[in-house]
Amino acid sequence: MNYKPRIFSLIFMMAFAFCSTEANDVGFVSRKGHQFIRKNKPYYFIGVNYWYGGLLAAGKDSAQGKERVKQELDFLKSHGVNNLRVLAGSEGYGLVNGVERLRPSLQPERGVFKSDILQGLDYLLYEMGKRDMVAVLYLSNNWEWSGGFLQYLNWNKKISDSTMQSKMSWDGLRDNTSMFYSCEPCKQDYLKQVDFIMRRVNKYTGRPYIQDPAIMAWQLANEPRPMRTSAVEHYREWTSSVASYIKTKDRNHLVTIGTEGIMGTDESSELFREVHTPPQVDYLTVHIWPKNWQWFQGTDINAQVKEVIKRSDEYISRHVSIARELKKPMVIEEFGLPRDQHLFSPSSATTARDEYFEKVFSSLRNSYHYGDVISGCNIWSFGGIARPREGQLFWKEGDDFMGDPPQEEQGLNSIFDSDGSTWTLIKSFADTLSPKKS
């Protein structure tokens, strides 16, 4: 029997453990069994999705963007929020799936990267570091609004310009996107962007990203799905290989996939378990979308919120069982609900949303008290000081970014800084998650 691989593996694990202990002392988030650890204490959090945060200081008016970043980070910090989920890079430009994608793009053309765009992410991480906040950075997107997998397929002639630009049916979108996992040049192009981001040295701190404790984790993509059962094997191999690849480049940070959970893994609890089993995947993620999954009908959300809560609780429980089995933490990293009566105006009420959020926060708080696997949640999505344009439903280039991506009605799921009842609720729960002794 050849013992060399075992010896090498043991040496690597000892070195990795030493590095992880040292990193934890300076504020990196690490994992110990089914819990996150930060500064040698279990780390539980209420966070927000702030996907556009790295773009604010990268636009034409960088000074104004920087002021917005500082103002919004101060606001979040004052309400107990210290964890932000952020888009690290987008691909291509122009129409995709019939809508305008966000700009500016990190990779507007295949293999052409705009390093100045990352100055916005540099600044966000710099300001987050000063406030002892951490970011989860996702590296691409299953969905069209930032280019993502469809753009890699287009660049590699798997889908035509006309197909990508026109509005696809749901089946057409599934058929097209599922090809990404078997497209070798597409996956290589994706890794080039991963490398470009991970090699970045922050302009403001002089610190390489891979040595920055303001980063909690790298996420393979936003909601990567196999999309079709025929793509499952390629999907499983891709998630595992990319997680391993990132770990060879960076031993300071956690890695996760970014899945919605069972709903996004071919509706298979077994596939969800399998893709989160490899040791290179540090934790599980769950997204909950009652509107998209048709857990309520029409605009009278208040009358149906109890059913939404019931189904969400069942969905969370199914994933908690798998996380316990794998002995890994779990984050409910996207969950949202429209305002009462499905209105978009910041002046409209959020009664149903607040009731729904309170239930999700209670699941986290209970997990905190019992030292269980639910370790955090990230609300979708922080709208900050931005406001929808009156009489305009969808985002156009030049508009302020808010929590709703370009393909969704602006104001649909955004939590604005003016949503007083929601922020009172957030802070009341965040205050209960003070660090515990390990």
Image: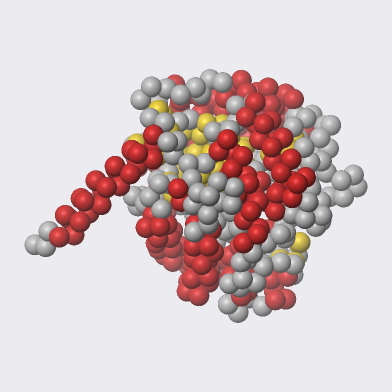
Camera-side residue: 294 or 147?
A: 147
Is 438 placed above or below 187 here? Answer: above
**Occupied quadrant, residue 417:** top right
Camera-side residue: 367 or 430?
A: 430
Whole-percent x, y for residue 347 in the image: 84, 31
Image quadrant in which the N terminus is located: bottom left
Whole-percent x, y for residue 333 in the image: 55, 41
Camera-side residue: 147 or 38?
A: 38
Camera-side residue: 52 or 100?
A: 52
Q: How did the renderer colour the structure?
A: secondary structure
As drawn, is 340 to the left or to the right of 184?
right
Q: Residue at x 87, y 46 (%)?
A: 389
As drawn, is 142 to the left or to the right of 167?
left
Q: Residue at x 58, y 65 (%)?
A: 149
Q: Residue at x 59, y 43 (%)?
A: 126
Image quadrant in which the C terminus is located: top left
As drawn, is 8 to the left or to the right of 63?
left
Regarding residue 39, the answer to whether it shows in the image is yes
Whole-percent x, y for residue 173 in the image: 63, 65
Is 293 placed above or below 187 here? Answer: above
**Occupied quadrant, residue 402:** top right
Regarding residue 383, the answer to whether it shows in the image is no
Outermost residue on the left side: it is 1
Q: Residue at x 65, y 72 (%)?
A: 109
Whole-percent x, y for residue 345 in the image: 83, 37
| Total residue callouts | 0
